Image: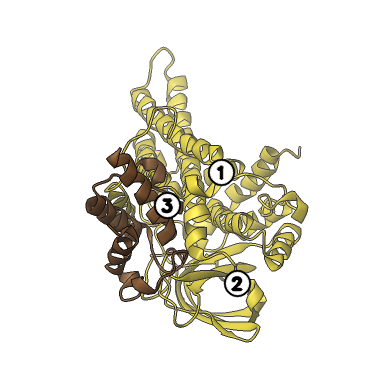
Chain colours: A brown, B yellow
Amino acid sequence: MNITQAIRDILGSNEAFAGKADQLSEDDSLFDMGLDSFGSVQLMLALEERFSVEFPDALLNRKSFATIRAIRDAVSTLVRQEAA
Amino acid sequence: MSTLAARAERAAAVAARHADAVDREGRFPEEAVAALKAERLLGLQIPSQFGGEGAGLTQIAELCSTLGHACSAAAMVFAMHHIKVSSLVTHALDSAWHCRLMERIAREQLLVASSTTEAGIGGDLRNSLCAVETTGEVFALGKDASVISYGAQADLILATARRNPDAATSDQVLVALLADQISLGRTGGWDTLGMRGTCSEGFRLEARDVPVEQILPKPFAEIAAQSMLASSHLLWSSVWYGIASYAVDRARAFVQAEARRRPGQVPPTALRLAEVSNAHQAMRGTIVTALRRFEDAHGDADTIGSLGFCVMLNNLKVTVSDMAVDIVRRALSIVGLAGYKNDTPFSLGRPLRDVLSAPLMIGNDRILANTAKLLLVQKSSGQLMSA
């Protein structure tokens, strides 16, 4: 399962990233590019559904959703915990 | 006396003296703001190395409440000024130009206003239509600012705009514009039920040849999430607490006067006063808890920008704004006709009209709708004594 591609697919369904999710670098600031609080909520919900995980409250901050790399790190950790 | 409380009391006394005239004439509370400058209260939050006093939001909140007791409009101007200053203090320390600006605010007691609202966008401060247009080392900005509170009286306006003409509406920067760098054409008035002295008029703002270094380096998205949301809700709430406290004080004085006239009896209104006192304490507890949580975060961006913290601040605003209206209304029912009339020691018309703005300035439904979205992912309500 390619987590990064899944994140890009989900981002692509957000208005701010439509058509450009695949061009984002792993460290581009998603907030600078227009991700707002509702967009990050939608992103979390989609990731939770896609990977059958739940983001704990401790991860519900801007840092966890700042970049594709940060999201992938958070999701990978949760997926590993789920598998263990 | 030169303690902070004493300085605030002196400024509040001036504000109280002119509050009725400010309200009646719908004019800027110039005497109160002159007193705030004379007591050097506009630079309080500026760090001491820039000539300020390094005050925290809790101290500013206390002053907002003191002023709210005296004159709602003066208190709201003071609160809005310090909300803007908190953005500079939190986000501009790495910008030499803005550090010099902070020195000027402290030294010259500059009054800072905000321009976020824009025609076509409404009150959604996280979107802009207007854009910074850079040519070499300078930029131009034209904005249909449907509201700039005390825009005509401010020494400095912090305005939101898109980063450049190609940027998304949410890709915003905050620019500092000195009064002598802009022209303001009035496009809308401010003839309102209450809060008449904030002079929140509409303007066409035009700025040209402004040095690009006056653009804050931090994206506005971060400023909004990490300092503005918290400072706005905490300081507005403190103003509303001051207004509610004034009404409760009037009601208490009224009940006590009744009690003195009929020794040996508890006046029937005393029971209603007990109810109001109950609500007033709950209101205070809600604000103090939020201020403590903010102070406990010690400026940590991850904590303050977290979803749980945002829910807490949203809840603070909705709860406190509704309680403030309820408390003033109930105080009026205790005082009765003496409160309804405008020329008695118990008059409550002005504070009632003023406080009715609380649930409307950023409408509570809009805030609840935002909370509703955040609750779609929040997992726990936290512990009693911790987040």
Mark 2 lies on residue: B215
Q: Residue at x 48, y 34 (%)?
A: B249
Identify the amino acid type marked 3.
Answer: Ser
Question: Which residue is tagged 3?
Answer: A64
State the CA–CA distance, disc 3 to disc 2. 27 Å
Tell which tag, 1 or 2, sits nearer the viewer. Answer: 2
Q: Which mark is residue B61?
A: 1
Residue at 63 percent across and 61 percent down: it is B92
Q: Chain of mark 2?
A: B
Provide the chain ID for the residue under circle 3: A
Q: Amino acid at mark 1?
A: Ala
Cα gap from disc 1 to disc 2, whole angstroms = 28 Å
- Compared with B91, B39 (above or below) is above
Is residue B156 toward the left or the right of residue B236 in the image?
A: right
Q: Secondary structure at mark 1?
A: helix
Q: Quadrant of the N terminus of chain B?
A: top right
Q: Secondary structure at mark 2?
A: loop
The foreground one among B237 and A63 is: A63
Residue A11 in view of the camera:
yes
Q: Residue furthest top?
A: B264
Vertically, is B157 above or below B335?
Answer: below
10 Å crowding of disc 2: few (<14), some (14-19), many (20+):
many
Disc 1 and disc 2 in contact, CB within 8 angstroms: no
In the rendered image, the vertical position of residue B282 relative to residue B142, given as above or below: above
On the image, the x and y values in percent for residue B173 come to: 52, 70
Q: Chain of mark 1?
A: B
